[in-house]
Image (cartoon, rainbow, N blue to C red):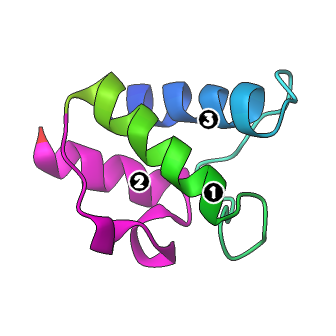
Amino acid sequence: MKDEIIQKTGVYIAATILKQPKRIIKPDQPLISSGLIDSFSLVDLALFVEDTFSVHLDDSELNKDFFDTLDQLADLVASRA
């Protein structure tokens, strides 16, 4: 399941947020701390994750402690499944 979360979320970020559909985002690549995604994009990403994986995310989790890499994000989602 974790691999599926990483794959789907990476594709979404590349295609929708970055507008670079061919870009590959590695599971350990920093997203927030590197500036790859900003706070506005973070909200869009959270909505995508909630809708796609049927989980609820608290606003307090929308930060680099939970969302800085696809790996962290997949762990969070998997813990809610």
Of callouts 1 and 2, the N-terminal one? 1
Q: Is residue 36 left or right of residue 65?
A: right
Query: Disc 2 on helix, strand or loop?
Result: helix
Relative image position of residue 14 (x, y in whole percent): 75, 33
Q: Is residue 17 left or right of residue 77?
A: right
Amino acid type at image mark 2: Leu
Of callouts 3 and 1, the N-terminal one? 3
Label 1: how many residues lie within 10 Å, few (<14), some (14-19) or many (20+)? few
Labels 2 & 3 near each other (Cβ < 8 A) = no
In this view of the protein, which residue sits in the foreground, 44 or 70?
44
Amino acid type at image mark 1: Phe
Relative image position of residue 37 (x, y in whole percent): 71, 58
Labels 1 & 2 near each other (Cβ < 8 A) = no
* Residue denoted by label 3: 10
Amino acid type at image mark 3: Gly
Q: Residue at x 35, y 24 (%)?
A: 52
In the rendered view, would you say 53 is above or below 43? Answer: above
* Residue denoted by label 2: 73
* Residue denoted by label 1: 40
